Amino acid sequence: KAGVTQTPRYLIKTRGQQVTLSCSPISGHRSVSWYQQTPGQGLQFLFEYFSETQRNKGNFPGRFSGRQFSNSRSEMNVSTLELGDSALYLCASSSDGVNEQFFGPGTRLTVL
Amino acid sequence: TQLLEQSPQFLSIQEGENLTVYCNSSSVFSSLQWYRQEPGEGPVLLVTVVTGGEVKKLKRLTFQFGDARKDSSLHITAAQPGDTGLYLCAGGSNYQLIWGAGTKLIIKP
């Protein structure tokens, strides 16, 4: 079956702009999680959506938001971009949010 | 707050050597997963352990879950350059995964 897809793969924005990233999970998976990863660092958990509801949330400011649609596809939005938001944003799909996470290739966001 | 601490944070060794990385917590987890991430890619699951004391082997990699299900270790025998990557552990609890910060492993030829 098809893997997790993320679009776009690369994005360059300037400070103050906003950005929307998209994630299509594996068919049948109801959980989508989003992570931020800066160079050489581990995964910082942003939030998890399960059946269109945000079930878990990490410690990020309100500028970071997300949603999940009825087909399980998810979007993540970052408003008023800051230089420190430059990172690789990974989404992962799972059947239940706790079992194996299947990761997409990520969206590399650069904020200038 | 549940935390998973991984050690060491960074390890650089020669090909052929053995190594062990650790994942420790004061919390009990219902399961523990190990992932490997290569540069430019998302993490990929290596193994899931669910039973206290469980040992799983994946070729030259041996994973162990502590008896109390609070800690885990990954042992690599005769490391190869292809083992290079970021190793992440994640503990499952209450419908969420808690992630460690990772161990960056470099195997030099």
Image (tube, grey):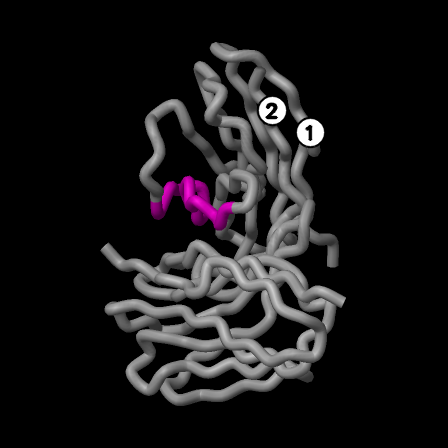
Marks 2,1: beta carbons within 8 A: yes
Vertical side of A3 occupied by B11: above or below: below
Residue A18's spot in the image, x, y percent?
A: 51, 16
Q: Which residue is mark 2?
A: A110
Residue A58 visible in image: yes
Element class at badge 1: strand
Q: Main secondary structure of the magenta part?
A: strand
Point out the frontmost of discs 2 and 1.
2
Q: Identify the residue shown where x is 49% and y is 50%.
A: A42
Residue A54 falls within the magenta-colored stretch: yes
Q: Identify the residue shown where x is 27% and y is 59%.
A: B2
Residue A80's spot in the image, x, y percent?
A: 44, 14
**Mark earlier in primary sequence (2, 1):** 1
Query: What is the spatial separation of the Cα atoms under label 2 and label 1, in whole angstroms?
Result: 8 Å
Q: Chain of mark 1?
A: A
Q: Identify the residue shown where x is 64% and y is 53%.
A: A27
Q: Identify the residue shown where x is 58% and y is 58%.
A: B86
Residue A95 visible in image: no
Stretch of the chain drawn in magenta: A41-56
Residue furthest toward the right?
A: B109
For label 2, the crowd category at 10 Å Cα-Cα, with few meaning under 14, some 14 to 19 and many 20 or more, is some
Vertical side of B82 occupied by A43: above or below: above
- Nearest the eye: A34 or A42: A42
Residue A33: assigned label: none
Residue A96's spot in the image, x, y percent?
A: 46, 60
Q: Which residue is mark 1?
A: A10
